[in-house]
Image (cartoon, helix red, strand yellow):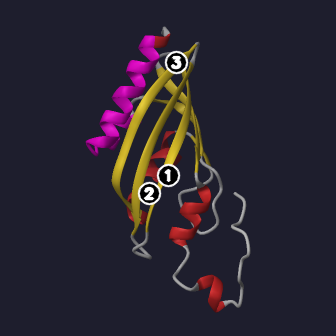
Amino acid sequence: MNEQGNISLLKQAYDAYDKGDIQRLLGLFAQDIAWELPDIEGVPFSGKRHGVDQVADFFRVLADCQEPREFKPDQFIGQGDQVVVLGHGTFTVKSTGAEYSSDWCHVFRVAGGKIASFKEYDDTHRAAQAYRPQGAGAAAGKTATRPAVH
């Protein structure tokens, strides 16, 4: 598949997610897809997964944990078998009620007309803060002079 074909495939994937059609989205993935988000303490859907079944579980846990307020891919950049997607999202964490926003970067590899790998880069500090129960740091007697580095 050429670069424009790869970009078209990724646009289909974001469209399926936007419409809540997770089954259609999963159909665009290779069976042995490698899926990686940064590990974030307290965020149940973070970390690595492998295979369509584990990625399907990722989307289930994601929906259980947070509500997207905005999730918008802004730019698609293709080179060879790689597609980089830049975008922005705003989410509400169901357990804390906190809202957070972040620009993000998604890096995909396409093989055999399917999405073979995914890696996300975003503001993990904002997500960690939103998932932390109110007053958790203060209750433990912790005061930070600088934000944690993630």
* In the displayed structure image, the side of residue 38 where residue 31 appears, left or right: left
Instruction: Please determine whether, in this image, residue 1 is positioned above or below residue 148.
Output: above
* In the displayed structure image, the side of residue 142 where residue 84 appears, left or right: left
Residue that label 1 marks? 102
Work out how far the residue at label 2 is from the one at label 3, CA to CA, in angstroms: 27 Å
Q: Earlier in the sequence, mark 2 or mark 3?
A: 2
Residue that label 2 marks? 62
Which residue appears at 47% of the width and 52% of the height? 57
Residue 21 visible in the snapshot:
no
Among all residues in the image, which is located at the extreme top?
Answer: 2
Which quarter of the image is occupied by the C terminus? bottom right
**Element at badge 1?**
strand
- Location of residue 15 in the rendering, given as x and y in whole percent from the top left corner: 31, 34
Amino acid type, label 1 = Ser
Residue depth check, mark 2 versus mark 3: number of the one nearer the observer: 3
Query: Is 83 a magenta residue?
Result: no
Kindly indicate the quadrant of the structure image that contains residue 135. Answer: bottom right
Q: Earlier in the sequence, mark 3 or mark 1?
A: 3
- Location of residue 23 in the rendering, given as x and y in whole percent from the top left corner: 33, 40
Amino acid type, label 3 = Gly
Residue that label 3 marks? 78
Which residue appears at 51% of the width and 32% of the height? 31
Residue depth check, mark 2 versus mark 1: number of the one nearer the observer: 1
**Element at badge 3?**
strand
Kindly indicate the quadrant of the structure image that contains residue 46. Answer: bottom right
Instruction: Give the residues drawn in magenta, as a range.
Output: 4-26
